[in-house]
Image (cartoon, rainbow, N blue to C red):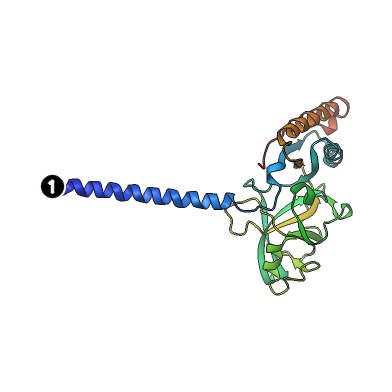
């Protein structure tokens, strides 16, 4: 009672401790809520590996086609697809689209992925409406080209952001990039999360049918339940054998690959 400094210091310490605890609980609750969200992906049965080609006349697309044929036939593999980036990885690409040409109408950013017609199955996402793009829609681009292909499979959240008044008729809608190049919606993904889990628009995603230009690309592999680790090891061994074969018989197709559990 004769020295008020002691109780005051204790009160300050208690207040600081309480503030730290409350903040820690808040952050933990946020993390738990994000972890518990439905990503729309079969994320417990997927892994990705980067592939990089080198040598002057390296044929990226021949390698990708041959690798995909092998991977899709391997035991334990549900499907596989080349993909520009990996969902939920923190790394990706985004751009702005508009419901009308000349940057008019509704607008929305989207996290987009260049891939082929196997991506929907490899990702494990569900089409709520429309169709997947086909093999003939896929563009293999040896050089960077401005603009997306003319069709895309998009999430419902992205489509509804552009066309809020036509939520029941989203398939077939056309939207535009900042150069007024059109993209037609062929299919609607019910739910899919993109690259950045902390983004408030994480569910605005587009799959676009384009592969390349390289020299690097990623392979996304979906496995049967319970076979992730074994399949990942087998895939790495199989791809390394193919790399050794190319190095011996076709130096212009030499590449490096390394399997990583990018989605788990």
* Residue depicted at x 81% and y 58%: 149
Look at the numbered disc 1 and give the secondary structure of its residue: loop
Question: Left of 12 or right of it: where is 55?
Answer: right
Q: Looking at the picture, does residue 106 appear above or below residue 158?
A: below
Outermost top residue? 248
* Residue depicted at x 77% and y 43%: 214
The number of callouts visible is 1
Query: Counting other residues with Cα less than 10 Å from the Cα at mark 1, is it few (<14), some (14-19), or many (20 or more)?
Result: few
* Residue depicted at x 10% and y 48%: 2
Q: Looking at the picture, does residue 192 appear above or below residue 242?
A: below
Q: Residue 184: where, in percent of width, then height?
A: 80, 64
Outermost left residue? 2
Work out whether residue 225 or residue 126 is closer to the camera in this orientation and state it. Answer: 225
Work out whether residue 253 or residue 175 is closer to the camera in this orientation and state it. Answer: 175
Q: Residue 177: where, in percent of width, then height?
A: 73, 64
Work out whether residue 217 or residue 125 is closer to the camera in this orientation and state it. Answer: 125
* Circle 1 residue: 3
Picture quadrant of residue 247: top right
């Amino acid at each position: 009672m004769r020295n008020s400094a002691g109780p005051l210091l204790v009160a300050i310490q208690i207040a600081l401790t309480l503030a730290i605890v409350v903040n820690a609980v808040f952050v933990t609750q946020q993390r738990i809520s994000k972890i518990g969200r439905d990503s729309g992906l079969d994320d417990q049965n997927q892994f990705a590996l980067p592939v990089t080609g080198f040598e002057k006349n390296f044929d990226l697309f021949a390698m990708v086609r041959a690798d995909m044929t092998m991977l899709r036939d391997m035991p334990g593999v549900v499907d596989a697809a080349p993909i520009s980036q990996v969902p939920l990885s923190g790394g990706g690409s985004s751009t702005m689209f508009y419901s009308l040409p000349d940057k008019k109408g509704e607008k929305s950013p989207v996290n987009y992925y260049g891939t082929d017609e196997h991506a929907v199955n490899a990702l494990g996402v569900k089409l709520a409406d429309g169709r997947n793009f086909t093999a003939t829609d896929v563009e293999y681009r040896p050089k960077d080209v401005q603009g997306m292909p003319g069709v895309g499979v998009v999430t419902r959240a992205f489509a509804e952001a552009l066309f809020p008044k036509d939520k029941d008729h989203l398939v077939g809608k056309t939207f535009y990039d900042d150069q007024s190049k059109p993209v037609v919606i062929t299919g609607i993904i019910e739910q899919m999360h993109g690259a950045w889990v902390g983004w408030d628009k994480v569910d605005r995603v587009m799959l676009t049918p384009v592969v390349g230009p390289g020299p690097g690309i990623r392979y996304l592999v979906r496995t049967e339940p319970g076979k992730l680790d074994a399949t990942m090891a087998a895939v790495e061994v199989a791809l390394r054998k193919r790399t050794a074969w190319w190095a011996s018989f076709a130096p212009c197709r030499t590449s490096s690959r390394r399997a990583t559990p990018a989605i788990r």
